[in-house]
Image (spheres, rainbow, N blue to C red):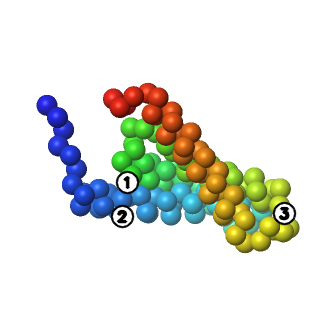
């Protein structure tokens, strides 16, 4: 028996209630996690707390976009803070301007998205 399709209202509500807050949690706490490495003496949450909260945000994103069973899509979001961290390690003086880090992280996330999409495309429609 076929599963009933979710309505557009349900999809929209899931996105608004889970994906957007999950993205905010993930980005804020991953930034706090990497901030500990740049300034370890500051008054920041413990890295384990930041990492755990970022993982909860990542699960909320996957739930909100309907990709919870296709968990490899989480790599698309994981590369954003990693790309920013790597960019700021290379460009310490921010010579590239304010837009360059965002463009770099966006391009890395876009490439990762196409790699993950191709991976799931090769597995077939059943997965």
Between 98 and 31, which is closer to the camera in this rendering? Answer: 98
Q: Position of residue 55 (x, y in %)?
A: 52, 49
Q: Position of residue 58 (x, y in %)?
A: 49, 50
- Kindly state the secondary structure of the residue where label 3 is placed: loop
Residue to which mark 3 is pinned? 92
Mark 1 is surrounded, within 10 Å at the Cα level, by few (under 14), some (14 to 19) or many (20 or more) other residues, namely many
Is 31 situated above or below 5? below
Which residue is at 76% across, 56% downward? 87
Separation of marks 2 and 3 at Cα, in angstroms: 36 Å
Between 35 and 60, which is closer to the camera in this rendering? Answer: 60
Residue to which mark 2 is pinned? 16
- Kindly state the secondary structure of the residue where label 2 is placed: helix
Q: Position of residue 114 (x, y in %)?
A: 54, 43
Q: Is residue 75 visible?
A: no
Q: Quadrant of the C terminus?
A: top left
Separation of marks 1 and 2 at Cα, in angstroms: 7 Å
Is 13 situated above or below 62? below
Which residue is at 45% across, 58% downward? 22
Q: Nearer the N terminus, badge 1 or badge 2?
A: 2
Between 64 and 127, which is closer to the camera in this rendering? Answer: 127
Q: State the count of labels.
A: 3
Q: Quadrant of the N terminus?
A: top left
Residue to which mark 1 is pinned? 64
- Left or right relative to 41: residue 120: left
Residue 3 location, quadrant: top left
Residue 38 location, quadrant: bottom right
- Kindly state the secondary structure of the residue where label 1 is placed: helix
Which residue is at 65% across, 50% downward? 108
Q: Nearer the N terminus, badge 3 or badge 1?
A: 1
- Left or right relative to 26: residue 13: left
Q: Are marks 1 and 2 in contact (CB under 8 Å)?
A: yes
Q: Nearer the N terminus, badge 2 or badge 3?
A: 2
């Amino acid at each position: 028996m076929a599963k009933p399709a979710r309505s557009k209202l349900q999809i929209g509500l899931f996105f608004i209630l889970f994906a957007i807050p999950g993205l905010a949690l993930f980005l804020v706490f991953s930034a706090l996690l990497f901030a500990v490495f740049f300034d370890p003496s500051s008054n920041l949450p413990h890295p384990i707390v930041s990492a755990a909260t970022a993982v909860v945000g990542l699960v909320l994103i996957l739930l909100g976009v309907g990709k919870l069973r296709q968990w490899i899509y989480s790599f698309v979001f994981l590369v954003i803070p990693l790309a920013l961290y790597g960019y700021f390690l290379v460009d310490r003086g921010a010579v590239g301007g304010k837009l360059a880090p965002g463009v770099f992280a966006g391009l890395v996330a876009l490439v990762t998205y196409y790699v993950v999409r191709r991976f799931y495309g090769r597995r077939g429609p059943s997965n």
